[in-house]
């Protein structure tokens, strides 16, 4: 299992192990992408861009190894209850305070199960599946605005009366016409 293709080391590490796996025609690689791979994320632009790279890199290599017994899976978790936000100095953001973070054990389980099945991509959690699916239909400027709000610090004195980004996305989903909804329901997740 290999993770971390968003760094130069991660790409080289993947290449090193992938070559050996292809030679013996057996192996599995798990790449850690993210739900932010699918959208612009102000205030965490570099992080989101590296995760978009991981997803793109993984999907490209998946095509290159097609026909072998080597599989590569992209795990796309959403915000998870780990030390990430503390290390990023973002523990006071709306995404941490208001959205309900994913359980890291469940994310790991989802990733492992998808890897063992040879799936190409797994988005962990229903909320995250909805968010990434809707990102196909929502203009990037709206996504950026919503993500900017989620990544903003929560004001301690004033209660925010606007709905969370997920509620806005879900409302937009329901307001779409039936043909788009039908397409979304048929879209593989």
Image (cartoon, grey):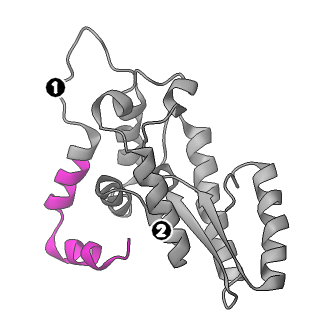
Q: In the depicted view, which residue is nearer to us: 121 or 60?
A: 121
Q: In the depicted view, which residue is nearer to us: 133 or 85?
A: 85
What is the C-alpha distance between the residues marked 1 and 2? 39 Å
Q: Is residue 187 magenta?
A: yes
Q: In the rendered image of this protein, does residue 104 appear above or below residue 125?
A: above
Q: Residue at x 55, y 78 (%)?
A: 118
Q: Is residue 69 left or right of residue 33?
A: right
SS for tag 2? helix
Q: Is residue 183 magenta?
A: yes
Q: In the depicted view, which residue is nearer to us: 125 or 146?
A: 125
Q: Is residue 147 visible?
A: yes
Q: Residue at x 72, y 82 (%)?
A: 26
Tell me which segment is drawn in magenta: 168-189
Which quadrant: the N terminus?
Answer: bottom right
Q: In the rendered image of this protein, does residue 148 appear above or below residue 28?
A: above
Residue furthest to the bottom: 67
Q: Residue at x 67, y 91 (%)?
A: 67
Residue 172 percent location from the top left of the image = 20, 54
SS for tag 1? loop
Q: Is residue 43 visible?
A: no
Q: Which residue is mark 2?
A: 113
Q: Is residue 87 left or right of residue 153?
A: right
Q: In the rendered image of this protein, does residue 136 appear above or below residue 67?
A: above
Q: Which mark is residue 161?
A: 1
Q: Please identify, in this view, whether the residue under mark 1 or under mark 2 is nearer the observer.
A: 2
Q: Residue at x 44, y 49 (%)?
A: 105
Q: In the rendered image of this protein, does residue 19 appear above or below residue 171?
A: below
């Amino acid at each position: 299992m290999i993770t971390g293709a968003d760094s130069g080391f991660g790409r080289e590490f993947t290449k090193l192990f992938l070559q050996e796996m292809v030679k013996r025609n057996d192996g599995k690689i798990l790449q850690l992408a993210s739900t932010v791979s699918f959208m612009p994320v102000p205030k965490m632009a570099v992080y989101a861009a590296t995760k978009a790279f991981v997803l793109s890199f993984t999907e490209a290599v998946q095509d290159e190894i097609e026909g072998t017994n080597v599989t590569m899976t992209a795990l796309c978790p959403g915000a998870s209850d780990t030390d990430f936000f503390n290390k990023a100095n973002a523990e006071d953001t709306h995404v941490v305070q208001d959205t309900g973070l994913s359980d890291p054990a469940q994310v790991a389980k989802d990733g492992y199960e998808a890897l063992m099945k040879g799936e190409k991509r797994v988005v962990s959690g229903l909320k995250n599946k909805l968010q990434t699916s809707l990102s196909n239909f929502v203009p990037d400027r709206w996504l950026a605005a919503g993500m900017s709000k989620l990544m903003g610090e929560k004001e301690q004195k004033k209660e925010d009366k606007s709905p969370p980004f997920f509620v806005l996305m879900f409302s937009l989903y329901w307001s779409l016409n039936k043909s788009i909804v039908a397409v979304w329901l048929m879209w593989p997740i």
